[in-house]
Image: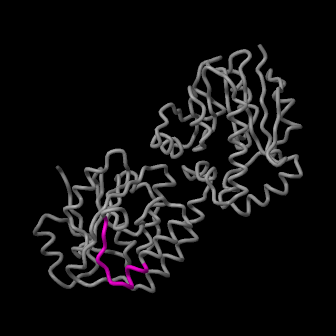
Amino acid sequence: MRHELVVVDGGSHDDTVRIAEAHGARVVPQAEPGYGAAFREGVANCAGEWIATLDADLSHDPRVVLDLMRARAGADLVVASRYVPFGHADMPLGRAVLSRVLNAVYGLVLDLPVRDLSSGFRLYRGAALRGLALRSRDFDVLPEALVGFYAAGYAVREVPFHYWPRGAGRSHARLFRFGLSYLRTLLRLWRSRNAFSAADYDYRAFHSRLPVQRAWQRRRYRLLTRMAGDYERGLDLGCGSSPVLGSLPRTIGVDLSPARLRFLRNHGRPELVRADAARLPFPDACCDLVVASQVIQYLPEPERLVAECARVLQPGGRLVLGFPDHDSPSWRLLGGLHARLTPGANEAPVQQLGSGALLPLLARHGFALEARHSILGAERVLKLRRAG
């Protein structure tokens, strides 16, 4: 197996450089202080398809790299974990307690399904890691990288390993500063984790811990799936990572975000197309169902989406259209609350739409209204039939 070994040297005064170079390693002098800086500088000097990161104090057994390589099938990041079954850690009590607390707090606040998010022993897909704009200076670069992978829709996996007591040197981590750095980073990562552009935004909203958000998402899910009815072939425009697509068999998911499509592929959804909902790469009359929920308000020219839906639908085909009704008093109240509670709510520009303007537009393109429903009076879901 071809490989390269990069050692980031933070100004050591022993024989580290000489010994590393004698064993074929390339030594990179660390330019900025801090673990995060060392991490970024090491990544910048690696050219491989996969990048393994580990500490040089013998607490990370390098033989485990082979286990990580074997576990990489179907994953973009493999974490050597102390806290999954068969994992173990030999650490001083104070450090062990801090590690457990930080992992629990970060996992809860950021909704990360990873047990050991502070483990620095990892195997990354190189292109994915180099594509992240990491900025943390200390050990908090580790959860920042995890959040970046989830936001981009990459697959993450954990495998067990034994964290051994330090075999050489002394730790540069200071427990108080270590914990303070993590806590300062937590708010920044929370905003990033909940950004509208995150690959799993819709999926996590469906399973939200906020009762109102969860109820809203599930009401939308029930309306969309019920109104879809019977059909032979469907398109879900702006599918995002919503569970709706998973309940619509024989339906192609369409989205402009590579991250969201990557997330869906990693969760077993094969029929996906990256495309602009206003410029669909499908032939005329190719389907008898189009679902377009929460997408029309993000288009600079909403009529383009309506025209495309009319083009790809067969005569008599069904359009299920969902959008926030900005004419509604309920939206003015609930939309403002949603914007305050959800950091990504105002991330993308939104067209101010309402039923009063959309219904005539839909009629001009040959759509007849069959049914309408609302979610708390603020979001409208319409079922329309294309003229035969």
Which residue is located at x 53 percent, y 32 percent?
Answer: 273
Could you tell whether 139 is left or right of 66 in the image? right
Q: Quadrant of residue 290?
A: top right
Q: Nearer the viewer, residue 321 or 3?
A: 321
Does the segment drawn in magenta span residue 186? no
| Count of marks, rendered view | 0
Does the segment drawn in magenta span residue 91? yes
The location of residue 287, given as percent across then percent down, is 63, 20
Which quadrant holds the C terminus?
A: top right
Could you tell whether 314 is left or right of 104 in the image? right
The structure's colour scheme is: one colour
Which residue is located at x 49 percent, y 51 percent?
Answer: 152
The location of residue 5, given as percent across then percent down, is 21, 62
Q: Is residue 266 above or below residue 226?
A: below
Could you tell whether 119 is left or right of 260 in the image? left
Q: Quadrant of residue 336?
A: bottom right
Q: Nearer the viewer, residue 198 or 213?
A: 213
The location of residue 153, given as percent across then percent down, is 49, 49
Q: Residue furthest front?
A: 85
Q: Which residues are magenta?
A: 87-98
The location of residue 307, given as percent across then percent down, is 73, 26
Q: Quadrant of residue 301?
A: top right
Q: Is residue 176 above or below residue 210?
A: below
